[in-house]
Image: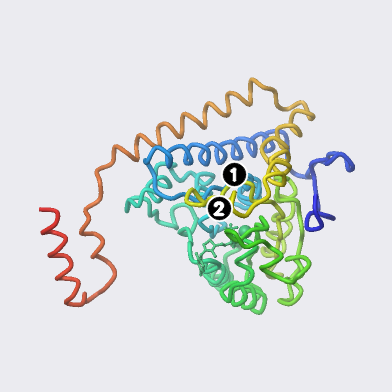
Amino acid sequence: MDAVEQGLRRVIGDGNEPDRRVEGLDDDALLELHRSLVLLRTYDERSVVYHRQGRIGTYAIYRGHEAIQAGLVHALERRDWIFPSYRDSAIGLLRGLPAATVLQWWRGHPSGWWNPEDVNVASICVPIATQVPHAAGLAWGLALKGSDAVAAVLFGDGATSEGAFHEGANIAAVVKAPLVLVCNNNQWAISTPLSAQTAAARLADKAVGYGMPGLRVDGHDVLSVYEAVREGVARARAGEGPTFVEAVTYRSAPHATADDPSLYIDPDRVAAEQERDCVALYEAYLTRLGLLDDARIDSVREEALATMRAAIQAAEDEAPPDPELVFSHAYANPPASLAHDLEELRRVHA
Ligand SMILES: Cc1ncc(C[n+]2csc(CCOP(=O)(O)OP(=O)(O)O)c2C)c(N)n1
Ligand SMILES: [Mg+2]
């Protein structure tokens, strides 16, 4: 454990501190959270395989970050909004978005674009931090309309160095937007380590500059993420404005399927981090509570695997998109050059 990970809030005991229970989470809720974690993990594991098999395109792996996504979703109500980054592409599964839809997104199929209002999950943002001002604006709009719904936005450590993060965090605090900003500090921005990204000792310290509280939690501990986000949600719903949550993790998987981290990452550190895997940590916690055993773990995993088998089948059964769609929807009055390009495309296809 290095300096970044010291003094983090935890619910799951770490050997020094004992396990805690989170107030308001009964046994059923704890087991539901486990199903969410396993569904996300299974989606991610299968996606890496589908990529290797050439069945989906480049994919941003989130192994080890499921606790942030599941903890966040469970701390929200269904009417609350979620703004994911590419790292959280499958978070909508926890809102009932079909896995086939998310797979289609990574297959470049137009049916991979869902209507955000169906699930209160915004489109995935790939340009770093651009989802932060989107989330701040929507949250502010909710408040202006008199709704008590809130929004939560996910982004990385690298995103906190972007102008869009600054602008979004700043305006959210000024207008007291009902927003929870959740930073997955996995200590890497592709091959740029945290130390080369920022001179701040702790990312949560940045919250002070915006005039909002900053919480730091162990991002491998799904319950500590849940607890912190729930605090932020309570503040937001009470009209007290945004909260920044820094969830400290470590990116022990490649940045994406197109990355070779062996060129820049320390394999011993990766192995040590994998020992603190978020799904295994939570399963051990539930087992200590007497809520989980191997048979239940197997059945939850089998259910998630069946979901994924059906999803890839459904995605691949769908008719391929019309390539001419590339030319649609970008311009009200397309420039003449596009007509020429479209003609050329038709000629090549013929
Ligand atoms: C505006 C912008 N600049 C650069 C990139 C290229 N890029 C893709 S991922 C990434 C790293 C982002 O790191 P972080 O915010 O920590 O998120 P993580 O990938 O670790 O989840 C960069 C720089 C981009 N997508 N968008
Ligand atoms: Mg990062």
Q: Nearer the viewer, residue 37 or 151?
A: 37
Q: Quadrant of ligand 1?
A: bottom right
Badge 2 residue CB within 8 Å of ligand 1: yes
User: In the image, 10: left or right of 248?
Assistant: right
Task: Give the residue displayed 43% in from the left and 53% down from the top.
Answer: 118
Q: Nearer the viewer, residue 316 or 121?
A: 316
Where disc 1 sits, the SS reads loop
Q: Disc 1 designates what residue?
A: 63
Task: Give the residue displayed 45% in from the left and 59% down from the top.
Answer: 123
Q: Is residue 77 above or below residue 143?
A: above
- The residue type indicated by label 2 comes to His
User: In the image, 116: left or right of 16?
Assistant: left
Residue farthest toward the top in the current orientation of the protein: 295
Q: Are marks 1 and 2 in contact (CB under 8 Å)?
A: no
Closest to the camera, between mark 1 and mark 2, is 2
Where disc 2 sits, the SS reads loop
User: In the image, 148: left or right of 248?
Assistant: left
Choose the circle earlier in sequence order: 1 or 2: 1
Q: Is residue 33 above or below residue 148?
A: above
Q: Nearer the viewer, residue 93 or 159?
A: 159
Q: Disc 2 designates what residue?
A: 255
Give how far across and how far down residue 72 sits, in percent.
Answer: 64, 52
